Amino acid sequence: MKQNRFLYSIKLIACLAVITIHAKFPDPVGGYIAALARFAVPFFFAVSGRYLLSGVYTTGEIRAKAARSLVKIVKTTAVVYAIYQLYSLIYHLIIKADLPAVFADRFNAASIKRFILFNTSMVIYDGSYVFDHMWYLFAYIYVLIFIVIMAPILKKIYKPLTVLLLLSLHILTWMQDYSLVRVLGLSLTTWYVLRSWLFTGIPYVLLGVLWADVIDRLKKDRSKEDCEKTFSRMRTIGICSLFLGIVSTCIETYLIGDKDIYFGSFFMVMGILLMSESLSEKGKSVWKIGKEASSNIYFYHVLILAIINFGADMGVLPDIPVAIKPLTVMLLSLLFFYGLPQGYHRVVGAEKD
């Protein structure tokens, strides 16, 4: 991401918000907070798309930029996955589990098939950490592969494809409790089918690509002063869209309960994008935390939560009340991934001086 302070700040807020999905506040308020947090992963996809192909239009340029991002995210995913598997091994050794049985339960044919198709299954989680948040990393890998393959025609098809997949995602999500939609034997209203690289990853990344094209065209065709006026008007619309998204998400939660995404999530993401240009240089400190720590907070907050829960089960850590557990995980995440690294760098810098 380029130096957009506003988006870095929102990225931090989004990563902290995800924690409230995995460590919920008590209901009924906790349910609504978790629902509002559902904007986070679509936002991650959209902001990735915002800077993925900005300023590039030829097949070679598209493939080159997507390939560089692909290499980077594959390396990141490998590290994150390895760390979680190491924790899983330690966990199962401590509880003296039957390791061959655990392996067979996780890496059977059905589990591998679901993982390959939809980026989720016990291939990426197990009893030691029960959330499959790593699906996002694998989904983004799939999206980048899709972009590399479709590069020759991407700029021709991405607008209608974005609209088609976004409508499919949000309409089918609403239909989950009311109708079973099958195509070629596949239930399109199953939650993990919709929350996948195809229905969530591709459209929201392409939404970011579309937004980048809009901004690039504005900056190319208009003067700096005209752009600033346009961005200011966009900010007003964005605030309204964000408010609409919050209200819509709360209403949808009341009507259809807990889902992986809402129409309101879309309006929240669009509101953020609309505000992002006029507020790109705003902020003093929060954006720095977002830039330095937000990715690791998302990657490893589940690990922190798992250790807290396992420690409490083993009697070596206190049992944290549900009402403050989300805040505890947030504070620990900020400490481990921003506070301690910053303190270390300051000490090292002081010693060098």
Image: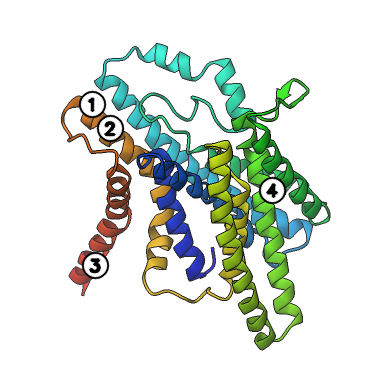
Identify the residue at horizontal 60%, vertical 48% (top origin): 70
User: Label 2 vs label 1: CA separation?
Assistant: 6 Å
- Residue 14, image x, y percentages: 46, 54
Q: Are marks 3 and 4 in contact (CB under 8 Å)?
A: no
Q: Is residue 136 left or right of residue 179?
A: left
Quadrant for the C terminus in the image: bottom left
User: Label 1 vs label 4: CA separation?
Assistant: 41 Å
Q: Are marks 1 and 3 in contact (CB under 8 Å)?
A: no
In the image, which disc is placed on residue 346?
3
Secondary structure under tag 3 reads helix
| Residue type at the position of mark 1 | Asp
Q: Please determine whether, in this image, residue 76 is positioned above or below residue 245.
A: above
Residue at image mark 2: 309
Q: Are marks 2 and 1 in contact (CB under 8 Å)?
A: yes
Q: Classify mark 1: residues with Cα within 10 Å, few (<14), some (14-19) or many (20+).
A: few
- Which of the marked residues, 1 or 3, is nearer the chain's N terminus? 1
In the image, which disc is placed on residue 313?
1
Which is nearer the eye, 313 or 351?
313
- Residue 218, image x, y percentages: 72, 76
Residue at image mark 4: 203
User: Based on the displayed image, in which of its 4 quarters is residue 142 positioned?
Assistant: top right
